[in-house]
Every structure is written in C-alpha cells, then in structure tokens.
C-alpha cells in the first residue's frame, strides 16, 4: 500500500497523462486540426517523456533533497532520456520519412515493371512510424511541464 503514497511516481504518471492530453488542444490551436488520437501517440508538444522524467526528478528532489544520491540518479536519468528524445529518436523519425518515401517510389517502379509485385503481402507493408522523437523545444516544454505538475501535485501528499 505504500506504493500509493509514493509522490515521485504519482508526479511522473500525472505529468505523462497531462502532457499527452494537452497535445490535443495545442495541436488544434496551431493547425486547426482536431486529432484526439495524438494523445495516444509518440512525439508532439510537449514531450511526455521529458515531462515524466522531470516530474520524477523534481518529486525525488522535493522528498529526498537535491543533495541526495537518489536525486543525482534521477537527474542523470532525466538528462539521458531528454537527450535521447530530442536526438536519437528525432533522427530515427527523419530516417523513417526517407525510407517510407523510398518504399513508395520502389512500389511505383515495380508496379509498372512486372506483375509479381501485386501480391497481397506487398500491398500490406506497414509504414515506419515517422513521429518518434521531439524537437528541442518540445523536450524543453515537456521538462517544464513535469516540474510544474510535480510542484502542483505535492501539496496533495502533505
């Protein structure tokens, strides 16, 4: 039952949920497209990964103190996660865009060249997910979101 009173976990989970669902009105405001499914996908503003790890780190800092070893572990974990979200995963998404375009071009080429490519399995190829990572601003605002959520949620655990 102690798990239910673990403030850093609740801060992180709350930050994830908040960050995922706030993406809907942000995308609508920017693009005028209402896309509720964005709440259940990766990428977008703000980064829920960044929100989660920054809320976790903030929660640990509030409970254990910023000079604790546990806070140091959480802080380094957060930095690595946010770096990955804005670096490696963002570039993997860019590669997916290029590969998807290449596969589309190859499909067109083969459709005009021979009949063997009209098999169902070829038609059913799954596109690579292109929205994997985050722009640096999305990571930054995800981090800010996590810190704010943790500080707003903490009084409920006093």
Image (spheres, grey):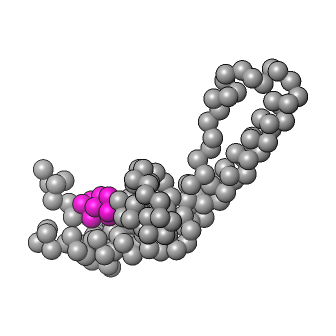
The residue sitting at the front extreme is 32
Front-most of residues 109 and 127: 109
Q: Quadrant of residue 93?
A: bottom right
Q: Say if 151 sits above or below 100 in the image.
A: below
- The residue at 60%/51% (across/down) is 130
- The residue at 16%/54% (across/down) is 4
Q: Is residue 140 left or right of residue 155?
A: right
Q: Looking at the figure, which quarter contains the C terminus?
A: bottom left
Q: Say if 35 sits above or below 152 in the image.
A: above
- The residue at 50%/58% (across/down) is 43
Q: Main secondary structure of the magenta part?
A: helix
Magenta region: which residues? 8-18
Q: Is residue 14 left or right of residue 95?
A: left
Q: Does any portion of residue 50 appear in the rendered image?
A: no
Membership of 153 in magenta stretch: no
Locate residue 77, reporting x and y percent: 44, 64
Q: Is residue 11 left or right of residue 133?
A: left
């Amino acid at each position: 039952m102690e798990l239910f009173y673990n403030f850093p976990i609740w801060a992180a989970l709350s930050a994830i949920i908040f960050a995922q669902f706030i993406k809907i009105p942000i995308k609508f405001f920017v693009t005028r497209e209402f896309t509720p499914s964005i709440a259940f996908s990766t990428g977008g503003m703000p980064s829920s990964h960044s929100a989660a790890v920054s809320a976790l780190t903030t929660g640990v800092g509030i409970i254990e103190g910023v000079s604790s070893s546990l806070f140091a572990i959480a802080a380094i974990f957060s930095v690595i996660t946010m770096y990955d979200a804005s670096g490696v995963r963002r570039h993997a998404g860019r590669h997916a865009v290029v590969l998807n375009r290449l596969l589309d071009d190859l499909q067109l080429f083969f459709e005009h060249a021979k009949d063997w490519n009209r098999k169902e399995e070829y038609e059913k190829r799954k596109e690579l997910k292109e929205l994997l990572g985050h722009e640096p601003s999305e990571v930054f605002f995800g981090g800010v979101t996590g810190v704010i959520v943790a500080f707003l949620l903490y009084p409920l655990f006093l």
